[in-house]
Amino acid sequence: MSDVRITIHRAASEIGGNCIEITNEDGARLILDVGRPLDVPEGSEPQLPASLDLSKPVEGVLLSHPHQDHYGLVQQLPASWPVFSGEAGYVAS
């Protein structure tokens, strides 16, 4: 059995803005959700969590469902990162 590390980049202490990273012992990364925080003031541009390393590749980004607090920052991801969602949750970039 391999070791897995889970990093909650955002949404551990608030509702919305979900961003969770799963990393295995070989360093392969999977990102679960890249949501827009719900408490961002109207007209403000929220950013991805600073703790999410955009310089390292990922196996993919999995969007759990089509709510802004789960996919709202997908346009800020590197273009090389594959994004996966179910048909009902497809987000055009």
Image: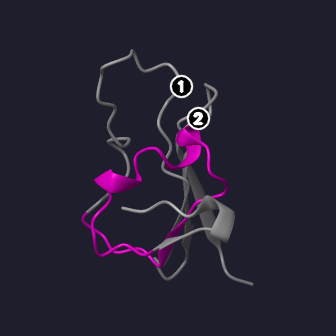
Q: Of circles 2 and 1, which is in front?
A: 1
The residue singled out by tag 1 in the image is: 38
Residue 86 seen in the current view:
no
Disc 2: which residue: 11
Give me the C-alpha separation between circle 2 and circle 1: 10 Å
Residue, far top:
41
Position in image of residue 6 (x %, y %): 60, 57
Circle 2 residues within 10 Å: few <14, some 14–19, many ≥20 = some
Q: Is residue 23 visible?
A: yes
Percent across and percent down for residue 20 are 56, 52
| Residue at the farthest left position | 55
Q: Amino acid at mark 1?
A: Leu
Q: Residue sitting at 67 percent across and 62 percent down?
A: 88
| Kind of residue indicated by mark 2 | Ala
Callout 1 environment at 10 Å: few (<14), some (14 to 19), or many (20+)? some
Q: Main secondary structure of the magenta part?
A: loop
- SS class, disc 2: loop
Residue stretch rendered in magenta on the structure:
55-82
Mark found first going from the N terminus, 2 or 1:
2
Quarter that holds the N terminus: bottom right
Q: Is residue 77 magenta?
A: yes
